[in-house]
Image (cartoon, rainbow, N blue to C red):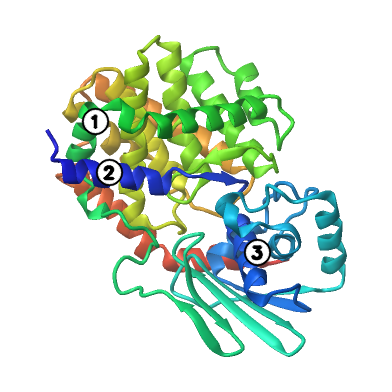
Amino acid sequence: MLNETICREYIKILEEELIPAMGCTEPIALAYAAAKAREVFGRMPERVTAWCSGNIIKNVRCVTIPNSGYMMGIEAGVTLGMTGGDAARNMEVLESVTPDDIETAKKLLQEGFCTVELLDSPVPLHIRLNLYGGGDEVMLEIRHAHTNITRIEKNGKVLYEKDEKGDESGTKADRKLLNLENIKEFADTIELDRIKELMDRQIACNMAIAEEGMTGKYGLGIGKVIREAYADGLGTKMKAYTAAASEARMGGCEMPVIINSGSGNQGIASSVPVIIYARENGLSEEMRYRALVFSNLLTIFQKEFIGKLSAFCGAVSVSCSSGAALTYMAGGTMEQIRMTIENTLADIPGIICDGAKVSCAAKIASSLDAALMSHHLAMRGKAYEAHTGILKEETGKTISTVGYIGKEGMRQTDKEILKVMLER
């Protein structure tokens, strides 16, 4: 039985990571920064410069901003946050935007209100806004996490500065306590009333947007196509609904998603397959909750090594987690859970992140397909041996190795991806 200190920290981790967000989290982070910066400025500025790290630029340029009249881009996210954003709503900052706010934002965009500059920063998630007007200037900076404000200045005076000597993520719970064995024991033993509300919210939000995505109104209608083109079955349904939820979110759907590790797609893919598997197999509510806890925490554990943003596609990590959760629900042993993780990471660690966009849904579907195969192999006692490629003797070491590749090894890849994306 885990001690109470670890249990409390794990619950805090879930509370910090499983939060609602409206739309793709990078343009929403810009809108949040803009809304907060305008509060500090005290009125609408005359102009704003948005300095953005490469990963912010990469993840904003191709997604539709929700509640925006189908606008896209950094300038739109910042300007809409200025005209109608409510910073008090955090990652749902644009929920209260009105049609008048949208029209005002469009007019300002035509007038060149916002300019964008590439911020040469070692921090993948890094935003700095400079607001100007009437002789006043405000600077607001966000680093590492989407709402993690680290510095605010007005007219050269520092109003707020965050000490980053400790945890850089802007979170408070101790993620160093995460490991595979403890995650499973926590999922097995935690009293359900302590996590039920969190899981119920994730189930309600993420399944609602999955149903909306299955209408086929967004992107290519990938979920609907998967259901129609592939043989009917549990795997097809899991892939279809998960991909559909992602596509709706990236396509401008205004419904909120419960995110994981700063990503709506990761929140979707760590929950929707698990929910559908439990539902279609008639599993108990208790098993569904415990499997969701397991999947979510395993995703967070993997992302701790990679970081919020990188050149490594998050669909790989999260599908690995949901695949392991299937093994968990199927009564697999701890060794079979390890096998599922190892098999998945032996298969698809090479998928690159070329920004947030509707085609992320296809990457999620493909990654889930790999995770399903890995699950079936593991349930038959089959797994790739240690030192097959990047696999290590211990599953936790394999996870950290993949994280190192994604965070450090692919830094130059990230730069080259951005360069290719910005070419005309």
CB within 8 Å, label 2 to label 1: yes
* Disc marking residue 190: 1
Element on which disc 2 rests: helix
Compute the Cα span from label 2 to label 3.
31 Å
> At 44% across and 56% down in the image, what residue appears?
308
Q: Amino acid at mark 1?
A: Ile
Q: Is residue 367 positioned above or below 375 on the image? A: below
* Disc marking residue 35: 3
Q: x and y percent of residue 18 in the render?
A: 44, 43
- Per the image, the residue denoted by label 2 is 10
Which of pointers 2 and 3 lies earlier in the amino acid sequence? 2
Quadrant containing the N terminus in the rendered view: top left
Q: Is residue 79 positioned above or below 271 on the image? A: below
Left or right? Give the position of 50 relative to 366: right
Crowdedness of circle 3 by 10 Å Cα count: few (<14), some, many (20+)?
many
Out of 350 and 166, give the one closest to the viewer. Answer: 166
Work out whether residue 383 can be spotted.
no
Work out whether residue 160 can be spotted.
yes
Q: Amino acid at mark 3?
A: Ala
Q: x and y percent of residue 185 in the render?
A: 19, 32
Element on which disc 3 rests: helix
Q: x and y percent of residue 26 in the render?
A: 58, 57
